[in-house]
Image: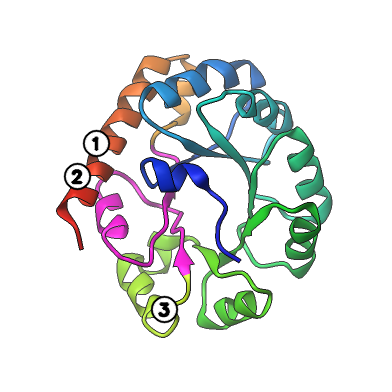
Amino acid sequence: MTVGLPAVGNGPRIIPVITLESADVAEPLAQALAAGGIRCVEVTLRTPAAEDALRIMARHGGLVVGAGTVLTPEQAERAVAAGARFVVSPGLDEGVAAGCRALGVEHVPGIATAGELMHALRLRLSTVKLFPAEQLGGVSMLKALAAPFPQVSFMPTGGIGPGQMPAYLAHPSVVAVGGSWITPSDLLAGGDFDGVRRLAAEAVHAAQAVERSGP
């Protein structure tokens, strides 16, 4: 099963990972990210406001919105009902995978080892989240896992910032890079959405530079 992220195919391969304490910021945040060139986001289900925020951001016509930190099939069902078009988990859970398949949405499970990756392939999941990417060894770890599994696409997430992002995007196995540096908590708390737009635009510019440089 390949990842169903149409925005990745038509835009920058960057997925901001967003944790919101209040749904009130969801609409201006969606507008800022889209204005900065972002086309795909992941809203984590880590706060009481997450489902409402996901629902609001999913209404924005310029964004493909997914749900992150999905731990149970029930969470996946609620997220899809709120408008999530893909589901991301920090680990690999057969129940979540089966639930997403029944719902008809793509599921990107987190993996940290070759054994977990083989388990994902047995579940017909060929796009996985390398998580936490930097803590596991960064691009070196990605290369080590990608070599024996050329059929796998990776979405590295965890500890990645603007300095590390280009090296990940340059690897042919990477479908997208996830990270929270575009939506830092201090900017969200202060309502600095122009700052978010600037960070988004900078990330998009850097990603486009990688694309132009080629393999």
The tag earlier along the polypeptide, 3 or 1, is 3
Question: Residue 95, relative to residue 157: is it above or below?
Answer: below
Question: Residue 163, relative to residue 189: is it above or below?
Answer: below
- Residue behind mark 3: 150
Q: Quadrant of the C terminus?
A: bottom left
Q: How far apart are marks 3 and 2 (CA)?
A: 25 Å
Instruction: Determine whether the residue tagged by mark 1 lies in a helix, strand or loop.
Output: helix
The tag earlier along the polypeptide, 3 or 2, is 3
**Relative image position of residue 67 (x, y in whole percent):** 64, 43
Please tell me which residue lies in front, 154 or 132. Answer: 154
Q: Which mark is residue 205?
A: 1
- Give, as a three-letter code, the residue at label 2: Ala
Range shown magenta: 153-181
Instruction: Specify few, some or many for label 2: CA neighbours under 10 Å numbering under 14, 14-19, or 20 or more.
Output: few
Q: Residue 209 carries which label?
A: 2
The answer to the question of whether label 2 and label 1 lie on touching residues, with beta carbons closer than 8 A, is: yes
Instruction: Determine whether the residue tagged by mark 3 lies in a helix, strand or loop.
Output: loop
* Residue at horizontal 74 percent and vertical 56 percent from the top: 100
Residue 179, can we see it? no
Q: Quadrant of the N terminus?
A: bottom right
Dominant SS of magenta comes to loop
